[in-house]
Image (cartoon, rainbow, N blue to C red):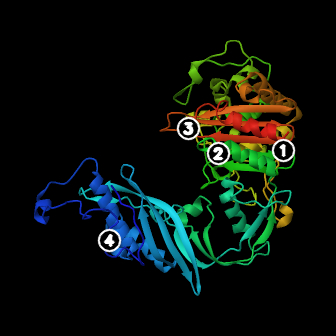
């Protein structure tokens, strides 16, 4: 068992983090241990606690070499632990382990950050996992998150004058946006600071912060402040977020694992709410996920424009359709005999769409997504980092799969909320969180709009799906001008697909995803429908 640590002085000193000798070998002699065969199999409790003890003791005492040697990546560990005291200026470290759970040992950190004559206390929780190395020796599985849970590969901790001034972010009504009130807004507030800190009139203070490395920057993650050591002066920036809808969005994702949702004003593109159940990454804006059958909204618009489908005309929906060497099928291998495109869309028939692939050019779907829906051009300027969708040119089977939102197609809830908004308003309006008038930036545009005849059919298809199709359950009781589309996206290694839902009601458009949860109508649907109701 791990004994509780009582801090005494600046370091561990004479006591051990754990009860007993701290040796995992007990009374065995060194020569006896050396003669034993390389250990294999599951780690013992003594190996886990002993390895954790060596690592935490050395780290607490500032013995970087010893701490790094207890890991399975001594070079990387030594670099980050050296920066912990040198660059981050973290001193007087006390590490208190908790009760192990299998091979994982949680621990708390209590320290002081010192910069010049200023000192601030620092506390946080982390954990480490012990693994067996190739030579059989148990070692700490090295990850930057061991040092601090906000760290990713290539990131580092630095205490210095902040590169960006802080911001005070406001909702559309002038109320302050904080993570205390809206827990999932952390990445959004970080992004606002990155872009508007100085522009909004702020002055940088001294902070302990995570400086992102190359890999994190490729994911468009902003630097993150962990502790304000010397106070700065925040600038003020107003957003388009609606406080009531934001609160509703937070409530919806809080009860679901790996859930994200976005709501926008269809006629303008204003983002009214954004929330993620994982507060560490803004999947709603930056996620890159196969959207499944919600992509059929875009595909349907293309097929109607090209005369390959018409709402109430007969349309094939066989159990299977083979294209490019792949055999595609419908969910539960259903088929619709003598059905129309309306029924195929409402029931989300995969083969109804893939059967048209032989009539399409490889770049048709890409052009439709870019030219009509403004997606996949990497030119959105929302006010914070976003992924703007991807619909690559593909051929053969992958092209067929892209028609139903698989293959190489990637989207996030912001993208799919914009798709619903484009259908509702009749034209693409780039979503934005900060009005372009604040900094004079130019919003993205689409090259063209759908014809009135195509738009009318597409709206009717989504309306019918909301009343009598796969979205009917979630949309029950929502009247007026509304439409919806469900989606399920298979992901390798997941037992259940990602569930998607995109919909509009009046001037409010919303979309959401719940990963590894099942069909969109049952998982993401209630979440999106709740926002449509909250928006009146």
Residue topped by disc 4? 15
* Disc 2 and disc 1 in contact, CB within 8 angstroms: no
Q: Residue 173 is drawn in which quadrant?
A: bottom right
Residue 216 versus residue 529 in the image, above or below? below
Of labels 2 and 1, earlier in sequence is 2
Q: Is residue 45 left or right of residue 114?
A: left
Question: Residue at the spot x=58%, y=32% of the render?
Answer: 518
For marks 1 and 3, give the CA distance.
28 Å
* Image quadrant where one finds the C terminus: top right
Residue 235, horizontal then vertical, whole percent: 78, 72
Residue 446 versus residue 359 in the image, above or below? below
Mark 1 or 3: in front is 3
Q: Is residue 49 left or right of residue 456?
A: left
| Front residue (pair 15, 224) | 15
Residue 462, horizontal then vertical, whole percent: 78, 30
Of labels 1 and 3, earlier in sequence is 1
* Image quadrant where one finds the N terminus: bottom left
Residue topped by disc 1? 266
Q: Secondary structure under badge 2? A: helix
Of labels 1 and 4, earlier in sequence is 4
User: Furthest residue to the top?
Assistant: 338
Question: Residue at the spot x=37%, y=58% of the render?
Answer: 141
Mark 2 or 3: in front is 2
Query: Neighbour class for label 4 at 10 Å: few (<14), some, many (≥20)?
Result: few
Which label belongs to residue 516?
3
For marks 4 and 3, give the CA distance.
46 Å
Which label belongs to residue 254?
2
Is any atom of residue 287 visible in this view?
Answer: yes
């Amino acid at each position: 068992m791990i004994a509780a640590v009582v801090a005494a002085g600046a370091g561990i000193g004479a006591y051990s983090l754990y009860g007993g000798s701290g040796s995992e070998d007990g009374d065995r002699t060194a020569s006896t241990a050396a003669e034993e065969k390389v250990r294999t199999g599951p780690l013992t409790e003594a190996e886990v606690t002993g390895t954790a003890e060596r690592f935490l003791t050395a780290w607490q005492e500032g013995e970087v070499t010893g701490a790094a040697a207890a890991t399975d990546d001594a070079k990387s560990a030594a670099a980050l632990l050296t920066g912990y005291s040198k660059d981050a200026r973290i001193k007087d470290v006390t590490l208190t382990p908790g009760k192990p759970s299998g091979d994982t040992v949680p621990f708390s950190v209590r320290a002081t950050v010192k910069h010049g004559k200023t000192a601030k206390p620092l506390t946080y929780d982390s954990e480490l996992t012990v693994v067996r190395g190739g030579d059989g020796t148990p070692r700490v599985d090295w990850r930057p998150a061991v040092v601090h849970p906000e760290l990713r590969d290539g990131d580092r901790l630095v205490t210095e004058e902040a590169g960006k001034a802080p911001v005070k972010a406001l909702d559309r009504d002038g109320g302050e946006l904080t993570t205390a009130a809206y827990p999932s807004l952390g990445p959004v507030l970080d992004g606002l600071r990155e872009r508007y800190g100085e522009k909004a009139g702020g002055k940088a203070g001294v902070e302990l912060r995570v400086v992102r490395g190359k890999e994190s920057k490729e994911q468009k993650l902003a630097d993150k402040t962990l502790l304000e050591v010397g106070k700065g002066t925040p600038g003020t920036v107003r957003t388009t977020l609606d406080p009531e809808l934001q609160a509703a969005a937070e409530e919806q994702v809080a009860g679901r694992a790996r859930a994200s949702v976005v709501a926008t004003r269809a006629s303008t593109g204003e983002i009214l709410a954004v929330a993620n159940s994982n507060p560490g990454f803004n999947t709603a804006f930056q996620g890159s996920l196969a959207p499944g059958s919600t992509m059929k909204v875009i595909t349907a618009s293309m097929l109607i424009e090209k005369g390959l489908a018409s709402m109430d005309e007969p349309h094939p929906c066989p159990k299977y359709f083979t294209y490019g060497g792949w055999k595609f099928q419908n969910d539960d291998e259903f088929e619709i005999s003598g059905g129309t495109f309306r029924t195929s869309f409402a029931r989300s028939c995969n083969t109804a769409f893939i059967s048209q692939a032989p009539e399409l050019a490889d770049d048709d779907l890409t052009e439709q997504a870019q030219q009509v829906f403004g997606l996949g051009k990497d030119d959105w300027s929302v006010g914070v980092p976003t992924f703007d969708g991807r619909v690559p040119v593909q051929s053969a089977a992958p092209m067929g799969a892209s028609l139903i939102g698989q293959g190489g197609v990637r989207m996030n809830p912001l993208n799919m909320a914009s798709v619903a908004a484009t259908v509702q308003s009749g034209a693409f309006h780039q979503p934005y969180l900060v009005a372009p008038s604040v900094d004079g930036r130019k919003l993205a545009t689409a090259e063209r709009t759908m014809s009135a005849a195509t738009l009318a059919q597409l709206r009717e298809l989504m309306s019918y799906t909301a009343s009598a199709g796969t979205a009917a359950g979630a949309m029950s009781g929502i009247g007026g001008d509304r439409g919806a589309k469900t989606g399920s996206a298979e992901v390798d290694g997941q037992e259940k697909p990602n569930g998607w839902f995109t919909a509009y009601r009046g001037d409010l458009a919303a979309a959401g995803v719940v990963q590894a949860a099942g069909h969109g109508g049952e998982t993401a649907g209630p979440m999106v429908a709740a926002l449509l109701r909250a928006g009146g």
